[in-house]
Image (spheres, rainbow, N blue to C red):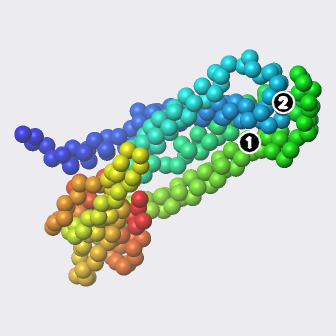
Amino acid sequence: MNTVDPAEARHERLERWRGHPGVLAGAVAASVATLVSGGLAGLGFGGFMEQFRTMAIDSVFDDRGDGKPPYVIMWGTLGVLLCLVTAAFAGAAVRRYRGRSAGPAFPVVLALAGSTAGTWVSARDWLPPLAVGTAVDPVFHEDEAWGFWAWVFYHADWWAPALLLALTLAALAHAVAAGRRHAELARTRDRLLAHGCRVPADVVEVKLRLASDESGTRIVGSTVTVSYTDAAGIRRWATRLSRETGMVIGPGGAEVLFDPARPGDEKSVFVALQRHPVLADWLPAGRT
């Protein structure tokens, strides 16, 4: 029989990870790997785009690129798979290091930035057409004038990297905005942990959240409603989205942190569904 409270052991483990230099080193290494993997993915995407471009602007009898091995596209596929792994690891490491409740968005920015650079490098080496504006037939000499899509793909060496750059900038703007929102919530939470009210709460309702894909239906979290009494003796309720799926309805088992000066301000109410909660366990309004 275990003599250690599992909730307390979890709290101590997560607190050891928070601010640990080894976790930070892992986050940095995974971030660099995400950037490099994104570059490989971009090279593969560029090679894929070159094939479509060649089919659009050249005759099928133009065999200049037939001798190229498909290594670039193969490495690009590997880069995509590595991006998924390294970006997830980088996000998890930063979440552990900073005690965050959700992974940061910056790994996506790194992956897109690497892909943009890789596509740009690839596009600089694409085969030029035999003649601009004409699909030259070097065998039967039945040349054809370019149509609309041929002209579009002819300029793909510019618009493909530009499109990825625009996606990178959009992801960067989202990451910055999300970081600011999280920082504001963290400041509010830390202020309330030092000067607010922290009271026990009852879990009164749990609704499981389901997701379906080709593998079937699975539980991805829950919507939890808790009931608590504020400093003035008024009964209040708060509903939060959580990744927890094993909640039990009953008395106790949750805590609420709120501002006694503004007990009705939803943005100043945080709910913890774990015993011995760490910083990341305090759920703000709208937490997903």
235 left or right of 137 in image: left
Label 2's element? loop
Q: Which amino acid lies under the numbered mark 2 shown in the image of this protein?
A: Ser
**Quadrant in the rendering for residue 124:** top right
17 left or right of 202 in image: right
Which residue sits at x=42%, y=71%? Answer: 267
- Label 1 Cα crowd, 10 Å radius (few <14 / some 14-19 / many 20+): some
- Residue 147 visible in the displayed image: yes
In the picture shown, does residue 3 fall above or below 189?
above
In the picture shown, does residue 169 fall above or below 58?
below
**Residue, far left:** 1
Residue, disc 2: 59
- Relative image position of residue 2 (x, y in whole percent): 10, 40
User: Which of these two is toward me, 209 or 280?
Assistant: 209
Q: Quadrant of the N terminus?
A: top left
Which residue sits at x=65%, y=47%? Answer: 168
Label 1's element? helix
Which label was assigned to residue 160?
1
- Marks 2 and 1, Cα distance to the nearest angstrom? 22 Å
Which label was assigned to residue 54?
none
Which residue sits at x=83%, y=24%? Answer: 62
- Relative image position of residue 283 (x, y in whole percent): 36, 61
- Residue 193 visible in the displayed image: no
Q: Quadrant of the C terminus?
A: bottom left
- Relative image position of residue 55 (x, y in whole percent): 77, 33
**Quadrant in the rendering for residue 38:** top right
Which residue sits at x=73%, y=35%? Answer: 52
- Relative image position of residue 205 (x, y in whole percent): 24, 68
